[in-house]
Amino acid sequence: MLSHPDVVRATLPAVRAHAVQITDRFYAALFAAHPELLNVFNQSNQAGGRQSAALASAVVAFAEHLLDPRAPFTPVAERVAHKHVSLGIRAELYPVVGRHLMAAVGEVLGDAVTPAVAAAWDEVYWLLACRLIAAEARLYQLGGVDPAQSWRRWRVAKRQVEAVAAVSFTLVPDDGGSVPDFLPGQYVSVAVDLPDGRRRPRQYSLSQGPGRGSLRITVRRIGVVSGFLHDLPADAPVLVGPPAGENTLDAGDGPVLLVSAGIGITPAASMLDHIARVQPTRPVVVAHAERSADRHALRAEVEHLTSGLTDATVLTRYSATDGRLDVDAIPLPHDVTAYLCGPVEFMRDMRSGLLRRGVPDERVRYEVFGPGMLDSAL
C-alpha cells in the first residue's frame, strides 16, 4: 500500500513521458559504477535501447498497479523473478539498482523531483524490489539453489545438428554432480566467455523433458552468443544457471495444444517428451510453422514422440514468405490449454485467433524472451 498515492498519481504522467530517458541514464550510470554487471545484462538489448524501454514499461506498469490493483502486473512479476533466478540475481543488487535509478529520476526530471516526490517514487521502487526479492527467494528455495553459487560448470556431452543453423547440445555437470529437476517448458541461462573478454548470458529453452540425467538445449545460430555456441565441440565447458520459467506444462490430464514457430519448437518438444513418457493417453495437438523443411528443428523427434501417443494430431506449415499458421485450421479439443512459443508477432496472431475461437485467456500461455518478456500481455 502506497503511503502517498496522490503524489505518485500526480507525477506518473511525467515519469511515463520520460521513462525511457530515465532508464537510459540509469543503465549508463549503473554500468559505469559497476562494470561487472555487464556480464549479467544482454548487451545486444542494451545497444538497441530495448532493455531501457522494457524497464521503463515495467516500472510504470507497477506504479499503475499500485494505484489500481486491477491493472495487471502479476504475470510481469513472475517472468522477471524467474529471469532473475536463471541469472543468479541476488537480493544485495537491489539497493545498488535503487540508488542509481532514483538518481536518474532526479537528473532527468530536475526540480520537479521535490523531497516528497523522491520519497514517493523511492517507495514505489522498494515495494517492487521487495516483491521480486521475496518471489526470487521462494524460487531459489524451491529449486534448492544457493544464489551465491547458482552458476555451475557443465560440459557438452553430445552435439547434434538438427536442421539448417540449429544444433542440440546435451549438457552434463562437469563435476559429476546431480542434474537439477525442472518442469517441462522451462529454460536455463547459458553464459559464454567471448574473445573480447566479456561474459555474455542468454536464455535457452530446454528441449527435452526432465528425468534423463542431462539437460538439452537446441540453439539456432542467431547473434553472437548463439554463433559462439554453434562452434563449440563435444566436451567443451559452459556455465549454466538453474532452470527457471513460469510457462510450464500443467500437471493435469486435459488436452494440450502446442503451437510454435521456428526455434520456438524447443519448449514444445520438452512438453511433448514429458507427455510421451508419463501421460501417453493425454490428447495433444502439435502445430508448427517454419520457413522450409530443412530448417525444421527436432522434426523427426516430434514425429517419433507423437507416434507413441494414443491421441495426437500434428500440423506443420512451411512458408518461405511468412512462416505463419492458419489458426482456424488447428483442431481445438474441448477445454484445451494452449502453449505458444515463437516470434512475438506470431504469438500475438495465434493468441488473438485462439481467443476469437473461444479459448479462455487463462488457457493461452506463452513464452517470451528478451525485453518482450516484460509485456503484461501480447
Image: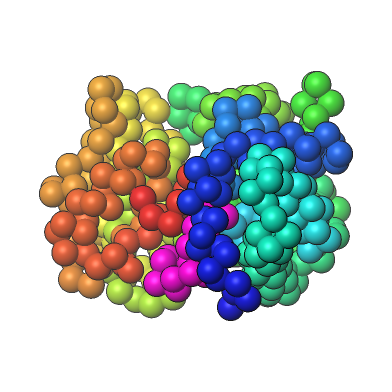
**Is 273 located above or below residue 240 in the figure?**
below
Residue at image position (51%, 60%) is 10
The spot of residue 266 in percent (x, y) is: 47, 46
Q: Is residue 89 above or below residue 48?
A: below
Where's the N terminus, which quadrant?
bottom right
Q: Which residues are magenta?
A: 57-73
- Residue 289 picture location, percent across and down: 30, 38
Of residues 100 and 264, which is closer to you in this image? 100
Q: Could one spot residue 127 in this view of the protein?
A: yes
- The one nearer the camera, 4 or 256, is 4
Q: Residue at left 60%, top 72%?
A: 4
Principal secondary structure, stretch drawn in magenta: helix
Q: Could you tell me residue 124's position as x and y percent?
A: 63, 64
Relative placement, left or right, of 16 versus 275 is right
Residue 138: percent from left, percent from top: 68, 74
Asked if the magenta segment contains residue 70, the reply would be: yes
Query: Observer-nearest residue: 78 or 100?
Result: 100
1 shown above or below 274 = below
Q: Nearer the viewer, residue 194 or 80?
A: 80
